[in-house]
Image (tube, grey):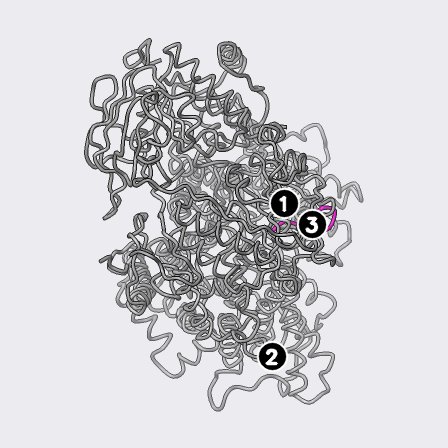
Amino acid sequence: MTDAESLGWWGVPIAVLGGALRGGTPFLLVSAGECLTEKSGKTNLGLEGVLLIGAMTAYAVSVNTGNPWAGLLAAGMAGMVLGFIHAVLAQQPKVNDIAAGIAMIIFGSGLAFFFGKAYIQPVAEQLPGIEFGWWSSHPAIRSALRICPLFFFGVAVVFLMQWFFESTRWGLFVRAVGDKPDAARAMGISVWGVRTCSIMAGSFLAGLAGAYLSLYYPGSWTEKISGGQGMIAVALVIFARWNPVGCLWASLLFGGAQALGPALQSVGISSYYYLFNASPYILTLLVMVLTCTNKKQLAGQPGALGASS
Amino acid sequence: MRSDTRHSTPPELELVKVTKRFGSFTANEDVSFKVEPGTFHALLGENGAGKSTIVKCIMGYHAADDGDIIVAGASRDIRSPYDACKLGIGMVYQHFTVVPAMTVAENLILARPDLPLFINWKKEYSRLREFLETAPFQVPLEAQISELAAGQKQKVEILKQLYLNSQILILDEPTSVLTPQEADEVLGMMRRMVDDKKLSVLIITHKFREVTTYCDEITILRKGKLAGAGKVKDLTTSEMASMMMGEQRKGKTIQKAELKPGATVLELRDVRANRDNGIEGVCGVSLSVRAGEIVGIAGISGNGQRELVEVLDGQRPATGGEVRVAGEPFHMTRAEISKHQIYVLPEEPLRNACAPLMSVAENIALRTFDRPPLAIAGTLLSDSRVRANGRQWIERFNVKTPGPDAAIGTLSGGNVQRAVLARELGPGTAKALVAANPCFGLDFAAVDFIHSQLLAARNNGVAVLLVCEDLDELLALSDRVVVMNGGKLVYEAPVAEANIREIGERMAG
Amino acid sequence: MDEPKPASVIASATAEPPPEPLPPPETQPGDIARERPPARALQWRSKVEALVIPCGAIAVALVLFGIFVWTQGANPFAVFASIYKAAFASTRSFENTLVRAAPIMLCALGTAIPLRLGMVVIGNEGALVMGGLMATAAGLLVVEAPALVVQLTMAGAGMVAGGTWLLIVGALKHYRGVNETISSLLMNFIGIALLNQAVNSWMKDPSSLNKPSSFPIPEEKMLTPLGTTDVHWGIVFGVVFCIVAYILIHKTTFGFQIRTIGANIRAAQLAGLAVGKVTLVTCFIAGAAPGLAGMVEVAAVHGVANESLNVWYGNAGILVAFLARQNALACIVVSVMLGGLLASGGILQRSHQLPDATILVFQGIVFLCILYSESLYGKFSIFQEKKS
């Protein structure tokens, strides 16, 4: 953690800011991936498994090649493979995509733990961070402002995705398929193809998020590395109302919430350490309770979401 | 676009001995007809006559098992709607195929087969505006489809095909969701484009008025086979009707006993409810239905009738007002339903009144499972009694099912409706009945049966509230007719004094 | 669109018989409503289908898993033999299997029962942890009482805690439309955090240093093993709970309401069923099962509440619920099989140098195959009633 104590209470907001940028990045990538997937009308709860596979693959490739960027790419590819399995399974008639996602979590984490066992000990070459705190002599500020390029990549992705949905042919296809598959089919759009591509692209992003976890922050491979972030992404997307840029703000919020517990502990408030650690989950639940309604369909919700194919 | 297949006048479309089978079932057999360039061609037939199947073969949804589809003089292998589009054939469906979450502009350009990878909205908008100037009707380009009324949506559907430069337009019962005035407007526009030789139209319909007013030629299907064809001006409607139905069928006049309506049974006071999107769809409806009376609610679909029925059958919470039955407040709880004996025949019975994966017997038991004799001591449920009860009603209502244990979702639509009828009207204890489009999609015999059941119920003193989109049916059955528009009741008259013209105008708003 | 609609002909339902022989109505492809084949024959075929398809899926999963371990340099047949040996071959190993099966079958009910309502609830882990935590707290409050009282108090507290945990999920779904899968998942994390917080502060036994734990339940107040075996009362609780759940769902009017709501909530509303009440009660019952599992883990295995309560039994329960196709009786059998599988994790490590995650991979493959097989029902003509 940061040595925030030297800043006293000021360390808390700085640590939270740092956490928002650092801890929010995986949320950002996963939720952007989930947003794309859900816009096409399917849910992928299995991104949790993808996250683990991504983290393991990236770490293993980085250990073996010494090149973290190769690890990053491999993680995305591994994510796409899992995404493809999910796409095939979740689009079978009578198969519930939530159940398929749970199966993918078990399968993905099984594979990740299986192959990852050998990589718990070795140390991998990490992704570099860009120092934006060079102007400050303070280590807490410098560490808070050391930002991984993947964060900027994620920010670019959400804005690109926004533009993609509005102003590209494939973006319109994805929205049409997600909102009214019958209509899309009548226009000669392959619903299966569009959904498969969306799910695989979403899983690619989740794979990158996994690589971020093991190669940047926290920066090691353990079996508990994902902490349910892949599943929380589904909630984040609801919170963001299926809007990619909304995912950015939601992710920063959750990254910040995650950093709250450790930050408070570092200034001596440790009595509710474990509960503060659960604050992202509590926050997600609160946000869902406050924003959901059973009175009407949520604005922005793709019409086909939750319907069986 | 594809100049190779485009002509200044529409191409000729001909079907030669087209046959389509589904397994052992033959949907179309040796169907041949020709749509001459620049004509308005009607395809007439009862439900299940195979009209939709044949046009789906033209559109490439189904591959015909036999026969040829000839467009512009050459036999074509149409494998998808996209292939059909390339040949200049477009279709407007009975249900909407526009994407609700998108704007009109997005929907229009989405249909373009040559949609560029990246969309320059400025350019697209100017092209769309240019196109709209020549189009027969206007819709706001920036509006989201989900905010449009049904008639507007239908116009977008047709605009979409015109924007695609379709020269043969297939319309599948395009006016079923429109007011008579809207229907005339839309079809009149189509007719003018046909007269200008810009378009050929193949319209699926069962409304003779539309055939005689707008069509040049007619093809009639019966049970999947060609039952007749000819020029509209050479045929009388009764000739068309007899071709459509086979033997001359006696137009059934509905016998209504003269009854003095009794006390008010069902009373609605300023009932309000929201649509799925949270916007108010039922905006203060007050109405009372007396014993021995059928009150018919007329209206174009989407004017709050569905929401109103859902309030009455407990599927939608009311946001205001109250419903009273026999003078007492009614909240659609099981105890109240059972006390007041209120029953419902909802539209789409499989979706609204049945649990598709549960057995026929269990579905029939849905009203009585918690009472003796089906329930033992109020808690245990006797499988054998549920089955026996089911078997009894299956026999009395002649439900065709492999057995009481078959899942009701595997039954045909008519048989599902019969099972629901058995459950709701079988015991004969109903005091009030809410029926919504009970005859939708059923054939003549089934319709007759349901009509006679409704009237029998009325004659026995049941208060009947009937919501029906078919105005003729509604007027034939009702004692009193009201019109619903924009979530409000805007017209009310005893059926004897009702003015059809005024009803039409009120329906249109 | 009007598909070739079955133009069924309704004969008069009242007095007179149909005047003429009914013409065979047109039907859609695959429509079985055309004639009346003997009811027995149809049932026989669909029952065989319901047996053959899952068995086939498991067989495919075994083959895929075999290929997987083969590519990892192990002999698949030897691996299967080891799994069997570790799970079922000896009395000792079978007892070990049953000890693991008990919490799994209780957790399975936590998912299987709400599935009947059409809700995919995955909150077993949280309900188990809360059940264990509250059972411990309650047990410690009455620790001076006779053993039976302590145990009953613990069981009651565990069930109420677990039930309440999933009741919250049901209430959020019913009143606020919150997706039950997501909320139950979040409740898992929150439950585990509460457990960690409790055993690290309020309930912490100062003598538990390596693994922070609650104060222990005295040995003599814990659940005893059955007879001379290592198997504890948990398996009895599990089997009884499964049987009760089965009767509740299939043989009572309340269960009929659950099934109707799950099959089509609109039809249930039309019939005036109290959807909210049934949802809440059902979720409570469903949560009580994993809550009881938590109590069993404390009262029969660990003797304390600590992190060991959170060992994937909840996830195994989700798998079982789907494998058993929500059937509470089938949950018993599948849980025993999965318990055996989990019990064999160690031997794969020792005898075949395969990591313990191998079992997880196997579970994943089985789950995927079973889900895929769901789409195969009705696809094989041999299981369909023949048309005359």
Circle 2 SS class = helix
In this view, the residue in front, B344 or B62, is B344
In this view, the residue in front, C303 or B391, is B391
Q: Residue furthest front?
A: B258
Disc 1 residue crowd, few under 14, some 14–19, many 20+, Cα 10 Å: many
A57 displayed left or right of B429: left
The residue under label 1 is which amino acid type?
Answer: Leu
Asked whether the viewer can see residue B359, the reply is no
Circle 1 SS class = helix
Circle 3 SS class = helix
Give the residue pinned by disc 2. Answer: C299
In this view, the residue in front, B340 or A17, is B340
Disc 3 residue crowd, few under 14, some 14–19, many 20+, Cα 10 Å: few
Say whether marks 1 and 2 touch (CB < 8 Å): no
Q: Which residues are magenta?
A: B315-323
Chain letter for mark 1, please: B
Q: Is residue B318 magenta?
A: yes
The residue under label 3 is which amino acid type?
Answer: Leu
Residue A86 higher or lower than C203, as above or below: above
Nearer the camera: disc 1 or disc 2: 1
A10 displayed left or right of A126: right
C260 displayed left or right of B87: right
The structure residue drawn at horizontal position 68% and vertical position 67%, both measured from the top left corner, is C199
In this view, the residue in front, A119 or C86, is C86
Disc 2 residue crowd, few under 14, some 14–19, many 20+, Cα 10 Å: many
Percent across and percent down for residue C156 are: 65, 77
Give the residue pinned by disc 3. Answer: A286
Q: Are marks 1 and 2 on the same chain?
A: no
The residue under label 2 is which amino acid type?
Answer: Ala
Q: How many numbered circles are shown?
A: 3
Residue B388 higher or lower than B16, as above or below: below
